[in-house]
Structure formats: C-alpha cells, structure tokens
Image (tube, rainbow, N blue to C red):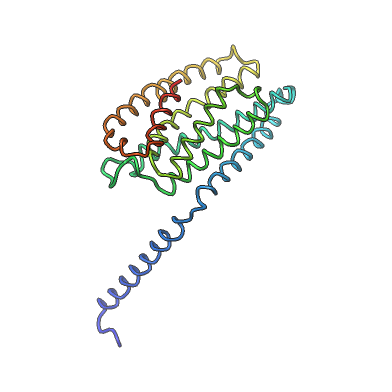
Amino acid sequence: MLLSSPSQVYYIRVMAMESYRYQAEVLVRDYLLADISMPYTSVIGGIFMCKMAYDLSQLISSVYFKGYLTLTKLQRIEWNNRGMSSVHAVFITVMSLYLVFFSDLYSDDGTGLIILRSSPLSSFTLGVSVGYFITDLAMIFWLYPSLGGMEYVLHHLLSAVAITYAMLSGEGQIYTYMVLISEMTTPGINLRWFLDIAGMKRSKAYLINGVVMFFAWLTARILLFGYLFYHVYLHYDQVEQMQNFGFLLVFCVLRFSQS
C-alpha cells in the first residue's frame, strides 16, 4: 500500500524506532543483565586489576625512584602492595561517592526499598572490590605476618564477606558503599609509609600529607559515619526487613570499620 502523506511516513518510522528500542530493552534485561556470571567476572577483573597495579608500581618505581632498588625484597613487595591498595582505594572511593551521592540509584525519590536497590554497575563495582580483598588477603597469608597481623586478616575477611553478600543478594548496598568511602584515607596512609621509607619524614611533603590525612580521616571516619548512622536511623523500618545475616552485617561492619 502506498503512503498518502508525510505524516504516515513519520508515524511508521516512529513505530519502527519504538519497536527496536523495546527489543533492545528486552535483550538487555533478559540476557545481559540476567547473566549470572557477571559478579564472578567482576571478581576476576578485580584480581586482574590488582596484578596490573602491582606490576605497574614495580615498573614505575624502579624507573623514577632511585632508592627503590636499594630496598630489601620484603620492602619492595610491601611498596608494590601499597601501590596496589592505593589504586583500589581511589577506584572504590570515586565509584562509592558517585553511586551514593550523585547517581539516582539510592535517591529518596526512587522506587522500592532503598536497602534493596542495586544495579549492574553497583554489583560489578563491588565484585572488583572483592577481587582486591581476595588478592590482598592472599598476599597477607603468603608473607604473614610481614604485611599485617591478625587484625588485617580479620578486617579483610569481614570486608570480603560483607561486600560479597551485598553483591550477590543486592541487600544493603548503599551502606556497603558508605563504608567503602572510608577507603579515601588509604592513599594518604600509604604515601606516609612511602615518604618514611624514602627518608623524607622531615620533608614538607610529609607534613602536607599529614594535614590532608587529618581532614580525610575527619570526613570519612567521623562526619560520614555520623551521616551513615543517621541514615540507618531514618530508614530503620527498611533495615529491619533485611535478612538476619544482612541485618547483622550492617551493624558488625559499621562497628568494626570505626576501629
């Protein structure tokens, strides 16, 4: 049948575009986002990211820091390990700040219970963090107790369990991300160690880093956790609806992360 007017042509094109858009949404919803292997893929990606960060730290340090080659083997391992942890800290801090404060995922105007909201991006990001904690925990066990004692083991185990639960269940991801924002203090702690090992403990850089660390700690460990507890209080009726294990993790992680 011949089309008799431009309006009919326009209508047919609009309907065709709507049909394609619907088919694309079905494809994403039923196949891409329903891929049960995605969380596990993200964990492997996190482990791969750690390997890359460790190797890059070793390469860059050996080229641009003359004192690196004079360090003992154990010091070089810890140096690279701290470089790896700094990369993870920057990544997870940026993603956590975005998801909690700048995206619409956990907005009060959103639909559904806030403690049950998740997205492919939020779950993928948590998987990358799980990959980091697995990698770092493996290194701690490998060189125990040179990279940290039992307190590090307990911290990493609890973190890995809590993040894995939030990733797989979708429960309490907002509070997991709020706690992970505290990783913003990690680069400063690592830089303090780098400067100390490099013999720059009396330098201006060491002093400036100490001041930055103070404000980062004040923001991430005191102000943010005050806001976190206030948020839990406001949404306690939702928190009560979590599974018992998730409910327990919320308060255990909050308490442990402050120590």
Front residue of this view, candidates 169 and 191: 169
Residue appearing at x 31%, y 41% in the figure: 114
202 versus 31 height, above or below: above
Depth check: 217 or 235 in front?
235
**Residue pushed farthest top?**
202
Q: Is residue 7 left or right of residue 170?
A: left
Picture quadrant of residue 202:
top right
* Farthest-out residue, front: 244
Question: Where's residue 95, x and y in %?
Answer: 45, 39
Q: Quadrant of residue 220?
A: top left
Rendered location of residue 189, percent (x, y)? 54, 22
Query: Which residue is at the front of the view, 206 or 89?
Result: 89
Q: Would you place residue 20 above or below residue 86 in this image?
A: below
Which x, y percent locates residue 230? Answer: 30, 27
Extreme residue in the bottom direction: 1
Q: Is residue 6 left or right of residue 194?
A: left
Which part of the image, by quadrant, shows the N terminus? Answer: bottom left
Task: List x then y, in percent, for residue 20.
Answer: 38, 68
Q: Is residue 14 above or below residue 130?
A: below
**Residue at the image point whose x is 44% and y is 56% from the top:** 34
Tell how many labels: 0
- Is residue 182 shown left or right of residue 81? left
